[in-house]
Image (tube, grey):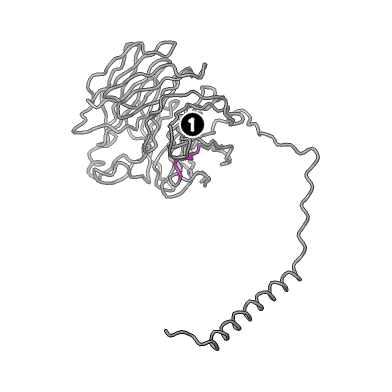
């Protein structure tokens, strides 16, 4: 394109100037007709900030872990009432949310957390934070070794002694160990190495188990100071090559049920002398296996101890679908080891939890919605959907 003449330049300038004058006129007209801004109201003379205090916990209160996939260094924990669907409060819990623990009377929430001084860089600090359940305000913290294990959220990254005295936090660097925190003194009591074994499955007041890669489970006993007192190993009760276990286990009493990828339940009972592996049993009969029914999800099993019912998320799929959600929950009687009920779900479930009371509710999370879906655990009736605010509600914990 050639250069413009001086006349052409003058014309362009005149048109531009005219447009600017027109816009200025529109702005002046708008200003002339605009309503005056409302004056800001004066603050009340007695207005003061306050902290809401929660009342006694209800039987259907539950906690939701949200690892916040778009910003995992700012994960959350939410407290809900399952009867009303109302959110009662929220905790900001640092990076890479896994699970929290709670005091036996639910007076305190214990949260393993990770922080960096520059958000995502700098010297790492791991803590077990203490939160008062009445106000959800911080009530202290214990510095723990900066190597707590984390990954795709699941329940067994931490645990708590039955009497509430100790919280156990699994570590991986990749060497494995467990940090033992005294909740009374709010201090680290010890770090116990668990070479070849990982994660935490608590039982009783002074024991916890770790699942081992050689097909066994190691039971660790601590003394009243939180230091290592004894170790014991189960017999080899699963084959890690032909049918390994998932880490997603369910507890009733002092027995943990572990599940294999092929759908076998392996009970392991903690005793005063260590651990005893029981006889495995199958969740699926021959017809179920022929139809490719499988367990799957981020946390697919939960037990209601009073009724001795086991709730398991199932789906139909191939051998590599163990993380797939399911549209059905099968319910088993733990005494007869038989399926007694089928619950059709409103949406495919990735995790399941059940309240502990005599009229239990069933909670599921789904990968399709930022929501918690609530059912009657006895009848299987769909009761309500609690949508948001958790962005990635991974799994539900019942106090």
Q: Residue at x 76, y 71 (%)?
A: 32
The quarter of the displayed image where residue 270 is located: top left
Q: Looking at the figure, which quarter contains the N terminus? A: bottom left
The quarter of the displayed image where residue 330 is located: top left
The magenta region covers: 71-76
- 219 left or right, relative to 145: left
SS state under label 1: loop
Q: Is residue 46 above or below residue 147?
A: below
111 drawn magenta = no
- 67 left or right, relative to 236: right
**Could you say where residue 347 lies in the image, as x and y percent from the top left?**
42, 48
**Could you say where residue 186 lies in the image, as x and y percent from the top left?**
51, 19
Residue under pointer 1 = 398
**Could you say where residue 96 lies in the image, as x and y percent from the top left?**
42, 37
Q: Residue at x 27, y 35 (%)?
A: 263
- Residue 163 appears in view: no
- Residue 316 appears in view: yes
**Could you say where residue 200 lies in the image, as x and y percent from the top left?**
37, 25
Say few, some or many: other residues with alpha carbon within 10 Å of mark 1 (under 14 / 14 to 19 / 20 or more). Answer: some
- 215 left or right, relative to 332: left
Q: Along the line of sight, which residue is nearer the eye, 333 or 145? A: 145
Q: Along the line of sight, which residue is nearer the eye, 251 or 28? A: 28
Q: Residue at x 48, y 29 (%)?
A: 111
Q: Along the line of sight, which residue is nearer the eye, 389 or 250? A: 389
Residue at the far right in the pictured view:
45
């Amino acid at each position: 394109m050639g250069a413009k003449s001086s006349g052409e330049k003058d014309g362009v300038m005149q048109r531009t100037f005219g447009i600017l004058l027109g816009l200025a006129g529109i702005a002046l007209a708008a200003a002339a007709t605009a309503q005056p801004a409302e004056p800001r109201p004066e603050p009340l003379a007695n207005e003061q900030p306050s902290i809401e205090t929660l009342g006694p916990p209800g039987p259907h209160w539950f906690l939701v872990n949200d690892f916040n996939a778009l910003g995992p260094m700012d994960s959350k924990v939410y407290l809900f009432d399952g009867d009303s669907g109302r959110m009662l409060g929220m905790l900001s819990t640092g990076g890479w949310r896994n699970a929290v623990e709670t005091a036996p009377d639910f007076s305190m929430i214990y949260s393993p957390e990770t922080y960096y001084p520059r958000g995502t860089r700098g010297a790492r600090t791991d803590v077990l934070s203490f939160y008062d359940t009445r106000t959800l305000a911080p009530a202290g913290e214990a510095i723990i070794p900066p190597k707590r294990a984390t990954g795709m959220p699941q329940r067994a990254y931490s645990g708590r002694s039955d009497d509430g005295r100790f919280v156990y936090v699994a570590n991986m660097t990749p060497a494995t160990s467990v940090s033992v925190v005294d909740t009374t003194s709010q201090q680290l009591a010890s770090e116990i190495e668990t070479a070849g074994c990982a994660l935490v499955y608590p039982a009783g007041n002074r024991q916890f188990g770790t699942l081992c890669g050689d097909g066994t489970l190691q039971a660790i006993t601590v003394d009243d100071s939180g230091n290592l007192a004894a170790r014991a190993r189960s017999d080899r009760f699963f084959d890690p090559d032909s049918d390994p276990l998932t880490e997603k286990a369910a507890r009733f009493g002092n027995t943990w049920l572990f599940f294999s990828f092929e759908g076998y339940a392996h009970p392991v009972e903690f005793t005063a002398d260590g651990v005893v592996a029981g006889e495995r049993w199958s969740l699926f009969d021959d017809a179920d296996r022929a139809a490719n029914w499988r367990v799957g999800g981020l946390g697919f099993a939960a037990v209601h101890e009073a009724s001795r019912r086991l709730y398991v998320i199932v789906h139909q799929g191939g051998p590599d679908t163990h993380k797939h959600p399911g549209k059905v929950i099968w319910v088993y009687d733990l005494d007869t080891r038989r399926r007694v009920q089928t619950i059709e779900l409103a949406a495919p479930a990735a995790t399941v939890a059940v309240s502990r009371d005599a009229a239990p509710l069933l909670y599921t999370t789904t990968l399709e919605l930022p929501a918690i879906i609530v059912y009657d655990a006895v009848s299987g009736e769909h009761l309500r959907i609690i949508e948001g605010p958790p962005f990635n509600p991974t799994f539900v914990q019942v106090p």
